[in-house]
Image (spheres, helix red, strand yellow):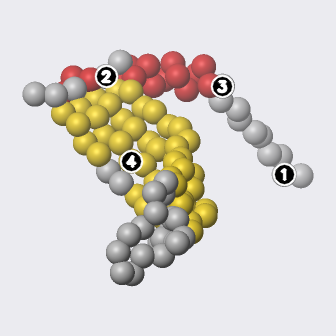
């Protein structure tokens, strides 16, 4: 007969193990999103009467290293609805350093 042993690890145990590293690092994970609407009409010879709009949702991962006062953020978005403009996904990187 084969026995399976399941091991569980509590969140407190994980935080305790990572505590020395967390003194110098800050990790942020969270949802992000945006909505944008064109509020004025187009003008010119090729102008259309359609006003563009886009709506997106995604997530962001941020890491701050305190000894260097350095922050890196990695956001990613997916536009789930777009009218009169391109629709798709985007990914970005931002780096901030205090001098």
Q: CA distance from mark 4 to mark 2?
A: 19 Å
How far apart marks 2 and 3 lie (CA) works out to 23 Å
Of the residues tagged 4 and 2, which is closer to the observer? 4
Dot 3 or dot 1: first in sequence order is: 1
Q: Residue at the spot x=66%, y=25% of the render?
A: 10
Determine crowd level at label 3: few under 14, some 14-19, many 20+ residues with C-alpha closer than 10 A. Answer: few
Between 3 and 60, the residue placed more toward the observer is 60
* Label 4 or label 2, whichever comes before in sequence order: 2
Picture residue at 48% right of the left edge, 23% below the top: 17
Circle 2 packing at 10 Å, graded few (<14), some (14-19), many (20+), is few
Against 14, residue 96 (above or below) is: below
Q: Can you give x and y, in whole percent of width and height, for residue 45 in the image?
A: 36, 81
Calculate the distance from the C-alpha at mark 4 to the C-alpha at mark 1.
44 Å
Closer to the observer: label 4 or label 1?
4
Q: Determine the image quadrant of residue 65.
A: top left
Real-space Cα separation, disc 3 to disc 1, in angstroms: 26 Å
Residue with the mark numbered 4:
74
Give the Cα distance between marks 1 and 2.
44 Å
Residue indicated by mark 2? 24
Name the residue tied to disc 3.
Answer: 10
Give the x, y percent position of residue 2.
84, 51
The part of the image, by quadrant, that contains residue 31 is top right
Residue that mark 1 sits on: 2
Residue 43 shown left or right of residue 79 in the figure: left
Q: Between tags 1 and 2, which lies in front?
A: 2
In primary-sequence order, the first of circles 1 and 2 is 1
Residue 58 is at least partly visible in this image: no
Picture layout, residue 12 above or below residue 98: above
- Which of the labelled discs sits on residue 23, or is there none? none
Q: Earlier in the sequence, mark 4 or mark 3?
A: 3
Q: Earlier in the sequence, mark 4 or mark 1?
A: 1
Left or right of residue 69, residue 83 in this image: right
């Amino acid at each position: 007969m084969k026995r399976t042993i399941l091991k569980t690890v509590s969140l407190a145990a994980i935080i305790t193990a990572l505590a020395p590293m967390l003194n110098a690092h800050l990790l942020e994970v969270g949802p992000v999103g945006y909505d944008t609407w064109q509020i004025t009409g187009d003008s010119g010879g090729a102008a259309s009467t359609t006003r563009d709009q886009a709506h997106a949702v995604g997530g962001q991962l941020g890491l701050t290293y305190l000894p260097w006062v350095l922050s890196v953020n990695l956001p990613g978005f997916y536009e789930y609805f777009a009218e009169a403009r391109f629709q798709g996904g985007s990914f970005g990187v931002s780096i901030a350093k205090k001098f």
